[in-house]
Image (cartoon, rainbow, N blue to C red):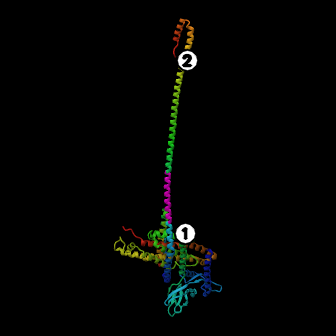
Amino acid sequence: MIAKKSIKIFTILAVVFSSFTSYATSDGSTEKEGQVNSPESINAYIKHHLADSHDFALYSYTNDAGERKHVGFPLPVMVWTSKGLKTFMSSEFHHNDDGHVIVDKGDVKLTKIHSKIYELNEGETHVAFDDQHHATNAHKVLDFSITKSVFGMLLAGLLMLLGFSSLARGYKKGAIPTGIGRVLEPLVLYVRDEIARPNIGEKKYKKFMPYLLTVFFFIWILNLLGLTPLGFNVTGQIAVTACLAIFTLIIYITNGSKDFWQHTLWMPGVPVLIRPVLAILELAGFILIKPFSLLVRLFANITAGHSVVMGIAALMILLKAKFGTVGATGISFLLTLFLSVIEVLVAFLQAFIFTMLSALFIGMAVEEHEHH
Amino acid sequence: MYNLIGAGLIVIGGGIGLGQIGGKAMEGIARQPEAAGKIQTAMIIIGALLEGLAFGALLLA
Amino acid sequence: MDIFNDFSVGLFAMQLVILLLLLFLLAKFAWKPILNSLSEREEGIQNALDEADNARKEMQNLQADNQRLLNEARAERDEMLKEAREMKNKMIEDAKEEANEAASKLMAQAQAAIQTEKKAAISDLKSQVANLSIEIAEKVVRDELSNKDKQEKLVESMLGEATLN
């Protein structure tokens, strides 16, 4: 049993590493964009990391021959262009991120600028930039690529499926879970007893458990993945948090009780003239402000966490002149360690808050008031 | 420049708010240690709401 | 604003698809069985607890019954002991009385016997004395009766002297 498992893991690792090396050697970019050592380049690096990316870079270095090598693996790009769906591997961009490499797909020319894929206008061969570094003769395309974030989501989804289906299967054998289930079960119970039950109410919480559990573990795992050196920043993508918030919005709007709508749209017990005003305020609160605060909170916390950790890590470079290599590394190591510990807490806290507030809003919507 | 000042103001406001929430929650817990769990949860929720507000403003700043 | 510029519709769509898929798969293969098993287990535990509670109550009842029985038994025993003691006392008393009675009867009999014996003895003695006296008297008379005066004198003096005790 264990031998079988280790063989599996070994095979996966072997496949992953062989793809790294082959990708690294096939990389032809010789640009000497080189090291990150000035405040500007650090800023740019942090910004680059915070954005989504089309390939999975682990690290890069400049070899003795002065070639820039990137270690990682390419991810598939799938874009919906004016000429239909185009798919290719992101290695065709050769890690170029400022529109200099143009991928010719027969009828459309594509390029990548700041992790976004642009389609050049008909007849153009090069990207022209204005003084703000915006492309003037290209436009964005609908990008359904398996980007790093999508990859991260798939990874998190796979982890969740594996972990929780094993927990589910564990119950068939006996009432008490074994293995990983021992860790997961208390978490499931925590979500149920601390988040869903008190906020939604004993009667109705069951219906929303799957959503709350999924969202909680999805966010938490992605937050934690973001803290690994793999460098995911999934929950720091506004599209991701927006999608999660809209899910919550849809759930509580579609499950609103009669009382909820009455209290939102035509508040009883206040003068008739004030009622429309209140209705507008309440509607704005439920439809705009609450989801917005959900999405912004998660996004901003994770983004801020990543920026600060990376900024502190960059102190290593910035303080080298003052404290020497060892001193600067020590300071930055200690601070980063400290911040990372806080970030682990934040990773949980944000998942908890998102789920908690979702449950709270759902609870508000499904609540049935006692009529006096 | 102005947006930095705005961000500073937001942080000051948010800090005061969080301080109030945390302080009062501590007082509450000290007064009724058996309700610590409930107070903590309420504190985190209100803190999160404040945080959402502050972050929203920071994004606009 | 940079952030809203960063918003990627494609990523949003992918996230939507992944989340929906994940929600569906997890709900079907994980959450449902997990939550069901959990609530089943909790119900089981609750039932077991209730049962244990009931059993404890029954146990308490039984114990109370036992205690009651024990108390009754003890009371009965005490009663019996008391009765026995009383009986014993009574028997002793009776025996004593009987003995006393017997003793006094015996005594009375003895006394009566003594009395009769005494009477008999006295009467015997009397008859012997009478015989003796008659013999003596015979002898004396025989001796004395040779002289008529003397005879009379003697008889007279003797009669004067003799008193029947």
Element on which disc 2 rests: helix
* Residue A181, image quadrant: bottom right
Q: Which amino acid does label 2 sit on?
A: Gln
Contact, mark 2 vs mark 1 (Cβ under 8 Å): no
Predominant SS of the magenta segment: helix
Residue A64 lies, in percent from the top left, at 65, 85
Q: Which residue lies furthest to the right in this view?
A: A64
Residue at 56%, 13% in the rendered image: C135
Residue A167 lies, in percent from the top left, at 54, 72
Numbered range of the magenta stretch = C44-68
Q: Does the magenta stretch include residue A344?
A: no
Residue C100 lies, in percent from the top left, at 52, 32
- Measure how far apart labels 2 and 1 are at the Cα level: 125 Å
Q: What residue type is labelled 1?
A: Gly
Decide if residue A274 is on the left or right side of residue C91.
Answer: left
Q: Which of marks 2 and 1 is in front?
A: 2
Report if residue B16 is visible in the image.
Answer: no
What chain is tagged by disc 2? C
Element on which disc 1 rests: loop
Q: Does the magenta stretch include residue C46?
A: yes
Residue at 40%, 76% in the rendered image: A283
Q: Mark 1 points at which residue?
A: A174
**Crowd class of label 2 (few under 14; some 14 to 19; many from 20; radius 10 Å):** some
Image position of B30 with respect to B50: above or below: above
**In the rendered image, residues at marks 2 and 1 fall on the same chain:** no
Q: Name the residue under label 2.
A: C128
Image position of A130 with respect to A280: above or below: below
What chain is tagged by disc 1? A
Image position of C123 with respect to A114: above or below: above
Image position of B12 with respect to C1: above or below: above
Say which of A301 and C28 sits in front.
Answer: C28
Residue at 41%, 74% in the rendered image: A256
